[in-house]
Structures are given as C-alpha cells and as structure tokens.
C-alpha cells in the first residue's frame, strides 16, 4: 500500500454551478475530521474556465480550519493529461476532447469544454492518480459530514471498502452496469441475482483498484476521457464494479457490504419523501448528508428550519451561512 493504511485521502470534484456548496463540506471537515487521520484532500476543478473557478474557491479554503494545509486545488489536466496518464491520444481526441473548448457551439461547461456530467465521472476516477493514501473517499460538493468518523467506517481491517450493496432494479442502474461490463469485456451470467455497490457518494475505494482499472481502460481506449467521450455510456462506479466482477461476483476483496449511513435529498423526490428524510436527521448513525440545493428549495419553511437547525446544532454552519450558501448555489443553477 502507498502511505499509512490508517489514514484517508479525500477527493471532491467541483463545478462552477455548485461550487458554493464546498463551504458547507469544508466546515464539516473542520468540525468532524481528525487531521491526524487525513492524508490529503484534493479539490478537483471540473470547468471549462478553471482560472475563474479557482479564484472563486480560494476564499472558501479557510473553512477547512486545521485541515487547510492538507487541501490542494488541482485542475483536470493534472490528472488526465500528465505523463503516463494516456497510452495514446488520437487526432480525434485532441480535437474533440482536449480541444473542445475551442469549438464554437460545441463547447460545454466541463473540463476543456466537455459535458460536465461525463467529465465529473472521469475526474473522480482520475483523482486516484494524486491521492496520497491507499484508502480514498470520493465526494461530491453536496456531501457534508454530520458527525465524527473513524477510518473503519469506510474500510475493513482487510482493506475492503465498506458501503451498501444493492440489487440491479432500476433501468438506469441496469444500463450503467451493462454499459460498464461491455466496455471492459466482462460477462456476468445472471444480472437478476447480482448485487453491486451503491453508486452514490461518499464512495470509499482502494486507490490500487482504480489505478489497475485505469491501466486497462488506457490499454483499450487510450485514456479514460476517450472512453467517456465515446458513444458508450458506462458510469464511474459501475466500471469499478465491472472490473471486480470479472474475478469475483461477490466483489471480493475490494468491497464489503455495509449498512447505509448516508442521507440524500434530491429534487426528484416528492415533498413528502423529503420531509420524511429530514425527520431522520438526528439519527445518530447517519454520517453524511447529500444536500442538493434545489431539493432544499422544495421544502416547506418548517422543514427547512429543521434542517438548518440540525446543521447549527452539530456546529457545522449557522442558519445565516447555510442559507447564504444555498442561495448562491441556486442563483448559479438558475
């Protein structure tokens, strides 16, 4: 293993449309993470205009408190176009992926002008190249911690990443898995009997597993960004599952089934479901909250107050700051 196996590396991918949420995540790190158990925190920029996004993030970094010295902001080029990170770069890749930001009417908002949703997944995998510990945890900006945690909540003594396993029931889950299996030329005899890891963040994973998979993707496609820039539609976490399923349908030794300790608020949920979830906010086993700002805007004033008060009670953020962060994010999302 690289580094001390008792410490964790974290990576958060940040986009210009949601970057204010990073302040709540940073405050939760400062409140609950033991600096001695954190090897590194990488804030990875996923934006066509990295210079502007970097400048906007800079004032937020102080919110990491005693962890600020472990935080490094990195651009996408560092983890996708560095030495040895591609086995080949075709002319098409150079023009349509690396140079997409130069093409009028085709340029999008993600890394080098690519689709932000796709590059978000690419950068999550690429972050393994710069993690400073073997045990890493991938985050989105919407994730914040609700209490203190030990590394054993994310990894077993044997090094397996601990997270919930789920059956393949939804159409999107099935399609992501099918596309990922196909991309890596893996055959699974019976999807109906299969369970995979969840596909939500926080997502713990061994750095070695990601690097081995990236090596195979490079061999097949030239680079991970080339795979995601193609017509194939895998997902980052189902690719990791597909890579493991080739050897063991139980996902050993890389993953271990564990109870869910995450609560997620999504704008696709009904208001009743959102209210039911907020009612669970004080459950002591909950470790993290996925706080989608558009979901919060759907809550009744009473339920929103309950959420804001819970964050204040935990010492993460006062109501005024939480409201300010969510308003700023909402204004960017439109």
Image (cartoon, rainbow, N blue to C red):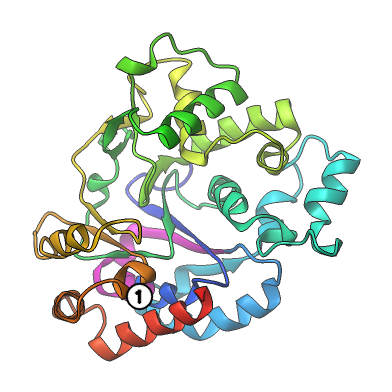
Q: Residue at x 27, y 50 (%)?
A: 151
Tell me where residue 265 appears, x and y as whole percent.
Answer: 29, 61
Q: Nearer the viewer, residue 334 or 128?
A: 334
Q: Look at the picture and state if 8 lies above or below 102.
A: above
Q: Residue 102 in the image: x percent, y percent?
A: 85, 63
Tell me which residue sits at (75%, 50%) in the image: 81
In the rendered picture of this protein, how many numbered marks are placed on residues? 1
In the image: residue 210, left or right of residue 266: right
User: Would you identify the image quadrant in which residue 26 lies?
Assistant: bottom left
Element carrying mark 1: helix
Q: Residue at x 57, y 82 (%)?
A: 56
Magenta stretch: give its range.
26-44
Taking the magenta stretch, the answer to whether it contains residue 246 is no
Residue at the outermost right position: 91
Q: In the rendered image of this protein, does residue 91 appear above or below residue 252?
A: below
The front one of 44 and 82 is 44
For label 1, the residue is: 24
Residue sitting nearer the eye, 30 or 48? 48
């Amino acid at each position: 293993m690289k580094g001390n196996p008792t410490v964790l590396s974290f990576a958060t991918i940040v986009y210009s449309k949601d970057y204010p949420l990073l302040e709540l995540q940073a405050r939760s790190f400062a409140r609950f993470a033991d600096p001695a158990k954190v090897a590194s925190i990488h804030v990875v920029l996923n934006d066509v205009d990295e210079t502007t996004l970097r400048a906007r993030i800079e004032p937020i970094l102080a919110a990491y408190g005693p962890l600020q010295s472990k935080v490094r902001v990195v651009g996408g080029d560092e983890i996708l176009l560095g030495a040895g990170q591609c086995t080949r770069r075709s002319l098409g890749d150079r023009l349509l992926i690396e140079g997409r930001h130069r093409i009028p009417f085709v340029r999008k908002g993600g890394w080098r002008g690519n689709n932000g949703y796709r590059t978000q997944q690419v950068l999550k995998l690429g972050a393994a190249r710069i993690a400073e510990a073997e045990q890493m945890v991938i985050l989105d900006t919407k994730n914040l911690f609700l209490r203190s945690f030990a590394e054993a909540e994310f990894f077993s003594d044997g090094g397996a990443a601990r997270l919930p396993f789920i059956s393949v029931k939804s159409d999107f889950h099935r399609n992501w898995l099918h596309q990922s299996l196909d991309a890596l030329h893996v055959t699974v005899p019976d999807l109906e009997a299969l369970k995979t890891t969840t596909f939500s963040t926080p997502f713990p994973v061994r750095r070695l597993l990601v690097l081995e998979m990236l090596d195979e993707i490079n061999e097949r496609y030239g680079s991970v960004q080339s795979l995601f820039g193609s017509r194939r539609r895998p997902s980052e976490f189902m690719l990791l599952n597909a890579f493991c399923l080739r050897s063991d349908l139980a996902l050993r030794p890389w993953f271990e089934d564990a109870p869910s300790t995450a609560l997620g608020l999504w704008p696709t949920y009904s208001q009743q479901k959102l209210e039911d979830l907020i009612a669970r906010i004080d459950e002591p086993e909950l470790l993290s909250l996925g706080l989608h700002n558009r979901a919060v805007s759907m809550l009744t004033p009473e339920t929103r107050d309950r959420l804001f008060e819970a964050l204040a009670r935990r010492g993460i953020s006062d109501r005024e700051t939480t409201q300010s962060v969510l308003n700023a994010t909402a204004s960017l999302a439109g």
